[in-house]
Image (cartoon, helix red, strand yellow):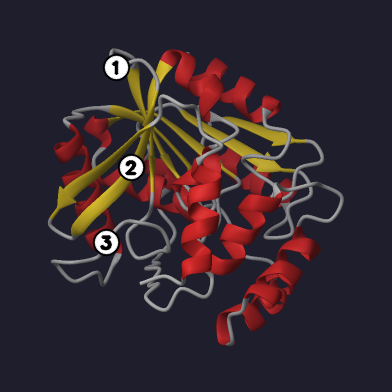
Amino acid sequence: MHLPAFGHAYDELRARWPESTEECDVATPYGRTRVHVYGPTKGSPLVLLPGGSATGLAWFANVPTLGVRYRVYAVDLLGDAGRTEHRGLALKSANDLTAWLDGLLDGLGIDRTDLCGHSYGAWLAAKYALHAPSRVGHLALVDPTQVFTGFRPGYLLRALPTLIRPSEARARAFLAWETAGTHPDETWQRLYALATTAPDRKLVTGARPRTTDLAMPVLVLLAEQSRAHHAAKVADRARRMLPQGEVVVIPGATHHSLPHTEPKQLNDRLMAFLG
């Protein structure tokens, strides 16, 4: 259940997507999953997983470019704010999340897809790529958290008030601190802030994925000014753990300004990698 203000912000951001975008509610053993679908029906599939509190709509500035070539499926995450419903099997662990994604791909009729995630969604994308490598062609991780390194203590300290006593004002203050110097979309900020207050959120986390076991091409896109972690340290570790991977640092970007603020660099890198 969400407050009316969240629904209004959700619909407002949805209106920013291309007119031909389709809404799909896909049945899975864990409930119905909302997917925003855009791009040519015969295009290669590309599944996008957002960060926590962001909803699948967070990719609004990316899909016009990605959807020229790919059939894009942007997902509202199970257990998070959005229009995915958790009804059915219990959601307790990362294994439940990968089983949910199995059911989602089955419901969409996708045997194999390219997969891209941001933040928490990148952690989930890496987990899924290890769980079902035959179903993932290319894997793109956008400023991934809890994949190569942990969070900065200062980031967790700043985030703590929004976790203990979530409110729109606290979430806004947190975003303003993390995205200083950038200009995140106002509607997205409102949706993110309201999402943190959703009473039925249950984000499941787990151990870091064994990235050395990833068997597909991997792209890691890091925000140079991310306050979630030290980009240089993450880049160094990613290069050591993914000798065949590609690691790119996006100048000026922060963790929460991705993927929509000044999206051209991210879009161009993704298109070149996937193409």
Q: Which of 36 and 155 is in front in this view?
A: 36
The three-letter amino acid code for the residue at tag 1 is Thr
State the SS at label 1.
loop
Q: Can residue 88 be seen in this view?
A: yes
State the SS at label 3.
loop
Q: Label 1 to label 2, Cα distance in Å?
A: 15 Å
Q: Which of 239 and 120 is in front in this view?
A: 120
The number of numbered badges drawn on the structure is 3
Please report whichever mark, 1 or 2, sits nearer to the chain's N-terminal start: 2
Please report whichever mark, 1 or 3, sits nearer to the chain's N-terminal start: 1
Residue 73: image location, x then y, percent: 36, 34
On the image, numbered disc 1 is attached to which residue? Answer: 41
Residue 95: image location, x then y, percent: 24, 60
* Residue 129 falls left or right of residue 14: left
**At x 39% / y 45%, what residue is drawn?**
125
State the SS at label 2.
strand
| Mark 1–mark 2 CB contact (< 8 Å) | no
The three-letter amino acid code for the residue at tag 2 is Val
| Mark 1–mark 3 CB contact (< 8 Å) | no
* 213, above or below 55, in the image: above
Q: Can residue 118 be seen in this view?
A: no
The three-letter amino acid code for the residue at tag 3 is Glu
Q: Nearer the viewer, residue 130 or 170?
A: 170
On the image, numbered disc 2 is attached to which residue? Answer: 35
Residue 201: image location, x then y, percent: 40, 72
**At x 50% / y 27%, what residue is drawn?**
18
Q: Label 1 to label 3, Cα distance in Å?
A: 26 Å
Q: Which of 268 and 72 is in front in this view?
A: 72
Residue 233: image location, x then y, percent: 70, 51
Image mark for residue 85: 3
* 212, above or below 271, in the image: below
* Residue 229 falls left or right of residue 14: right
